[in-house]
Amino acid sequence: MSDTIISILMLTGVLLTGGAVIVFRKGDRRRALLMFVAALVMFANVTIWLVPIK
């Protein structure tokens, strides 16, 4: 179950990053920045979840 959630988060992060680039090229910098920050938060969550616990 957790593998599915991590996969969905990674795909969503990649899509948000691509969407942020497209929106930035159209000129809406604020929305692009918010999308990019949301993608970074998703990547950070995946990183935290995958850190091994001793």
Image (cartoon, rainbow, N blue to C red):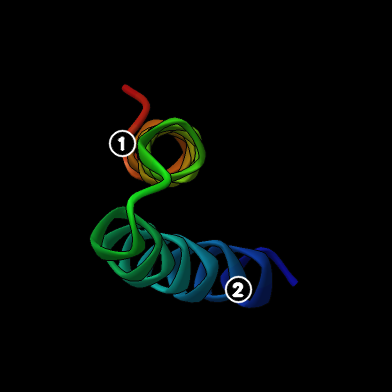
- Residue 35: x, y in percent? 48, 45
Q: Nearer the viewer, mark 1 or mark 2?
A: 2
Q: Is residue 54 left or right of residue 42?
A: left
Which of 38/11 is in front?
38
Q: The residue under label 2 is which amino acid type?
A: Ile
Q: Secondary structure at mark 1?
A: loop
Q: The residue under label 1 is which amino acid type?
A: Pro
For the C terminus, the image quarter is top left
Q: Earlier in the sequence, mark 1 or mark 2?
A: 2
- What's the residue at 46%, 62% (across, down)? 16
Q: Secondary structure at mark 2?
A: helix
- What's the residue at 58%, 72% (across, down)? 3
The residue labelled by disc 1 is: 52
- What's the residue at 45%, 30% (across, down)? 30
Q: Which mark is residue 42?
A: none
The residue labelled by disc 2 is: 8
Cα distance in 3D space between marks 1 and 2: 20 Å
Which of 53/44 is in front?
44
- Residue 37: x, y in percent? 41, 32
Hey, which quadrant is residue 52 in on the image?
top left
Q: Is residue 18 above or below residue 16?
A: below
Q: Is residue 28 above or below residue 13?
A: above
Which of 40/50 is in front?
40
| Mark 2 nearby-residue class (10 Å; few <14, some 14–19, many ≥20) | few
